[in-house]
Image: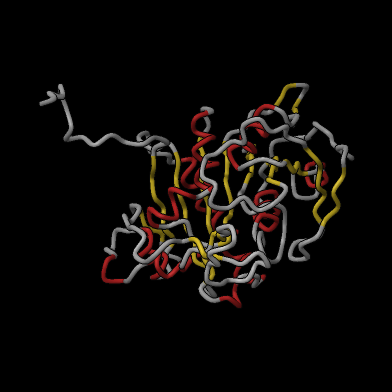
Amino acid sequence: MHILVVNDDGPPSRDASPYVHSLVHELQTQGHIVTVVLPNQQRSWIGKAHFVGEVVKATYFSPGEPFRFEGTEHQTPQGLSNDTHSSSSSSNGAQDHRPWMLVNSTPAGCVQIGLHHYPHYQQEGRPIPIDLVISGPNLGANATALFSLSSGTIGGAMEAVLCGKRSIALSFEPVARDDVCNPVQITDACRHAVHLIKHLYHSWDEGVELYSVNIPLRSAPSGDRKVMYTRIRPNRWLAASPFQVVSPSGDATEQNADSSLLLRWAPDLSDIHGSMDRTSNADDDWAVREGKTSVTPLKANFMHAVHCKGEIHLK
């Protein structure tokens, strides 16, 4: 397949975006053609937004070795070639040296630019169409309504659907902080993800427009992972505001009556997850907590409430 990869975490980074390079490497190793267009910085919690009135600038990025979280950024597309000798090019083929594109835009913007403005690979002089868009892998699960409705990862996948493409939003959930950059767990999760992506693509349900996939990082072989169809768990903010008052110096503090109101986005993630007793065994959050891979079939729309019908009579 020819796969477009976007994300909301930006270019490879140990702290913000530790998974995208490993996924691209695994996709290429499995014989897929991969085009990569990413935001030039983290754009989490941005949903399916576009920046209105902004001029988007593209630069080009040649990644280093996986797990080194480094690379070289160029103003011009050095080494850009449209040629690929076959749709089953190996990771040692020309596509492995094709630069990624970085843009000062959103995940949804990356989808549009990747589909329409990054020169496609060609075979026998003809562009190879993109078969699938993968948005991710996100650092952290995109489970429950609060995460999903704000997710740039899911937003990018929804944008792809609105462009007529099948898409999968992919997120990895570290079980512990020390596992965030664990090479063994990341490699295994990427292999599992590529296997699952292939299965979903070739057995795509006709009622599905995109899938949201959440994979826990685990010390277990891919073949031992259980995969569950799930639904998004409905939840709400439980505590106070997700914004934190800060001082002009940037420190969290009580607001001074004589100064401007300054706020930092700082949601309490335990508030978002909620307690286990509000979770059913059909929910995405439950599956991830149980160490299972969650696959949530979705449509790219705001579904209407089915019980509200007919004319409205005002009194």
Question: As displayed, is residue 58 above or below residue 10?
Answer: above
As drawn, which residue projects farthest toward the left?
A: 315
Q: Is residue 191 visible?
A: no
Residue drawn at point x = 48 percent, y = 63 percent: 267
Which corner quadrant of the image does residue 177 belong to?
A: bottom right
Residue drawn at point x = 58 percent, y = 59 percent: 262
User: Residue 209: where, in percent of width, then height?
Assistant: 43, 36
Along the line of sight, the residue nearer the viewer: 271 or 10: 271
User: Residue 30: where, in percent of width, then height?
Assistant: 65, 50
Please state, as top left, top right, bottom left or bottom right, where the C terminus lies in the image. top left
222 sits left or right of 312 in the view: right
85 sits left or right of 166 in the view: right
Please state, as top left, top right, bottom left or bottom right, where the N terminus lies in the image. top right
Along the line of sight, the residue nearer the viewer: 249 or 60: 249
Look at the image and name its color scheme. Answer: secondary structure
Q: Is residue 127 visible?
A: yes
307 sits left or right of 58 in the view: left
Q: How many marks?
A: 0
Residue drawn at point x = 66 percent, y = 59 percent: 17
Along the line of sight, the residue nearer the viewer: 205 or 288: 288
User: Residue 60: where, in percent of width, then height?
Assistant: 81, 42
User: Residue 248: where, in percent of width, then height?
Assistant: 65, 64
Residue drawn at point x = 57 percent, y = 56 percent: 138
Which corner quadrant of the image does residue 276 belong to?
A: bottom left
